[in-house]
Amino acid sequence: METEKENWQHTKVEIQYRYAWDWFSYHAAQRLMGFRFFLIIIGGVFVGYLRLLTSKSPIFAGYICVFGAFISLGFFFLEIRNEELVNCGRHSLDKLEGQIDMQIRNNDKERECLKESLGPFIRWLFCITEDWRPTKKTCIEKLTRHRCWLRSIYTIVLIIFFALAILTFLGKI
């Protein structure tokens, strides 16, 4: 029979785990929701740019591009903050998993399931053999992270809008 202290420790771990999971889950969802909003806003900005460009208002079209670049930069930095908050949850889950004898976070850190998740075509394309183990230095390990894709997209869109602004102000478009 559990003593009152053992019961409290069990309840405390449950509360800590639920709190850490809710924190992680909420901020991971915020990260993807922010990206969806970015796509919608940038789509609207680009449509505005095209409309202003075709209505013979290139100066305003250029300013719209500057706004698009600014929005991209803002979302880039929000992505960094969102990852920071997600990592806070990850670190807490790392500590708690040891107490409840689970390995999900450790498996994720070590990318234990990456090879089977790639599927046969990608394994063939990247010459991944049976004895292959992912490391932080491999291209495929980096390409399968949210950080890589979200930040790349924000950066590419920023560069495109910045280039469009310059070309528009110079009268090249």
Image: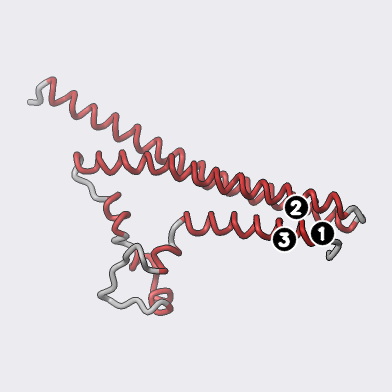
Sequence-first tag of 2 and 1: 2
Q: Where is residue 51 in the image (x, y as percent from the top left)?
A: 85, 54
The numbered disc on residue 65 is 2
Q: Residue furthest front?
A: 170
Sequence-first tag of 1 and 3: 3
Gap between marks 2 and 1, in whole Å? 9 Å
The residue depicted at 32 percent of the width and 42 percent of the height is 91
Observer-side mark, 3 or 2, equals 3
Amino acid of disc 1? Thr
Sequence-first tag of 3 and 2: 2
**Tags 1 and 3 touching, CB below 8 Å:** no
The residue depicted at 39 percent of the width and 71 percent of the height is 119
Observer-nearest residue: 2 or 82? Answer: 82
User: Callout 2 environment at 10 Å: few (<14), some (14 to 19), or many (20+)?
Assistant: many
Amino acid of disc 2? Cys
Observer-nearest residue: 140 or 168? Answer: 168
Q: Is mark 1 on a helix, strand or loop?
A: helix
The numbered disc on residue 163 is 3
**Tags 2 and 1 touching, CB below 8 Å:** yes
Image quadrant occupied by the N terminus:
top left
Q: Mark 1 points at which residue?
A: 168
